[in-house]
Structures are given as structure tokens and as C-alpha cells.
Image (cartoon, rainbow, N blue to C red):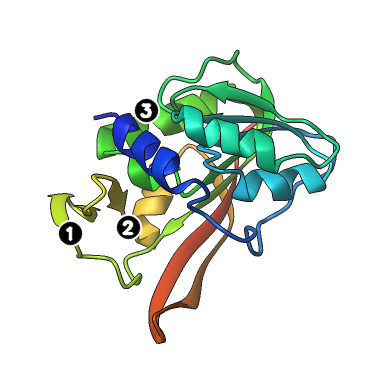
Amino acid sequence: MAPDTGAWEREYARRGTIWAGSAHDLPAVPAGLRVLELGCGNGKTLQVLLRQGLHVTAIDLSPSALSLSRKHSATGREPDLCAADAEYLPFRDGSFDAVYAVHVLGHLEEEGRQRAVSEITRVLCGKGTLIFRDFSTGDFRYGKGERTGPGSFRRGTGIVTHYFGQPEVMALFSPFACRTVAFTSYPLRVRGVSYPREEITAVFQKPA
């Protein structure tokens, strides 16, 4: 099942900048590489990639998100923005040196995640780098909302979020060699109360 494009578009059109601040502790790749960002949203990760001197192509399903990314990426280096689906990438084989999948695969159903990984594998060049980040099962929102599948829950916005464990991440990216994997926990304060957020970040390399 594809992600609910309408739900994302409604959220970005209604709220504007959903994701504030800057992407923290993002694994870096050398400047000058051709990079694809999946699901750029309102440009939180995109801004970091552009500041690193990368040649960035960024995709999203939401027109409002792409408009926000264009507005927020005025850093002197313009990205190529494209309305596209991570499950069906409109790029040639081996087009990119690196792919960033930051909080995007967790919004796909299981079959969609498998298709997206196949597409990532296809558009990455040999020895290309994949950076993955999503919420883990240690996150405070795990288990909250309507269960749509193992580890996946739909909240009131209509958006589904999947929460990953390390074995699942390793299995999902089995075609790749894992270079690093780590869990990061941090507090989210809402109305004076702290809630524990937890992410899993992994860096993989495609075989030659």
C-alpha cells in the first residue's frame, strides 16, 4: 500500500512547517557527491545536505512540502526538487552516489518498504552509500493509535508510522553491507512533560 498522499498534503497545507529545527547528527558523505533524499518534507534534512556542498535531488509526494523545501533551501546551492514516490523512482540505474532515507520508510507499509529498498538499490551506483533513519520500537509513540500491521500504527492525522527494531533493519537492507548502526534517545517536551523519543540510524554500502 502506498502512503496516504492526501493525509500528508493536508498536514503540510494546514500546518506548513511540520518539522522544525535542523536534522541532528546526520551521517555525512564527502562534498560534491550526487545525493538523493527520499521524502524531503519541508526541507529539514535538505538544508543540512546542501550546506555540506552536495548535489542534491530531493523528492516528496506532497506539492505543499516541495514548495516549503524550495523556500527553506535558499542556501546558495539549489536542489533539484521532484514530485515522486519512493517506491517508483523516476531515475536511471546508478544515478546517485548516496541516498538519504530519513523518516520516510517508516511511513510505508511492508510491501512498500521492500519496493523502496529495491528502488534505492537500483538508483545507487556501485559502492554507493545509504543513510537510513527512522523511529525505533523504544519510542514513546510505539503502540499508540490504530494498529495497521506489525509495528505500524495510524494516528488521528491518518498518517501511518512504522517503528523499527535492529533485526528488522538488518533484514530490510540485507543486499547492503552495514557500516554502522546506532540508537539515539532524546526527550520531547510537550506542555512541560518530557516524553522519550528514540531513533535508529544506520549507514549501509551497496556492493560494487
* Discs 3/1, front: 1
Q: Is residue 54 left or right of residue 19?
A: right
Residue 50: tell me if it is visible.
yes
Q: Are the residues flagged by discs 2 and 1 in contact, CB closer than 8 Å?
A: no
Whichever of labels 2 and 3 marks the residue nearer the N terminus, that label is 3
Mark 1 burial class by Cα count in 10 Å: few <14, some 14-19, many 20+: some
Whichever of labels 3 and 1 marks the residue nearer the N terminus, that label is 3
Amino acid tagged 1: Gly
Amino acid tagged 3: Arg
In this rendered view, identify the residue nearer to me: 90 or 178.
90
- In whole angstroms, how far apart are the C-alphas of marks 2 and 1? 13 Å
Q: Measuring 80% from the left and 47% from the top, which residue is drawn there?
A: 51
- In whole angstroms, how far apart are the C-alphas of marks 2 and 3? 18 Å
Q: Measuring 75% from the left and 47% from the top, which residue is drawn there?
A: 29
Amino acid tagged 2: Tyr
- Circle number at residue 145: 1
Q: Against 83, is 20 above or below?
A: below
Mark 2 burial class by Cα count in 10 Å: few <14, some 14-19, many 20+: many
Whichever of labels 2 and 1 marks the residue nearer the N terminus, that label is 1
* Discs 2/1, front: 1
Mark 3 burial class by Cα count in 10 Å: few <14, some 14-19, many 20+: some
Residue 139 quadrant: bottom left
Q: Against 62, is 49 above or below?
A: below
Whole-percent x and y of residue 107?
A: 35, 44
- Circle number at residue 163: 2
- Circle number at residue 171: none
Whole-percent x and y of residue 110?
A: 27, 39
Q: Is residue 205 left or right of residue 139?
A: right
Task: Give the quarter of the figure containing the C terminus.
Answer: top right
Residue 91 quadrant: top right
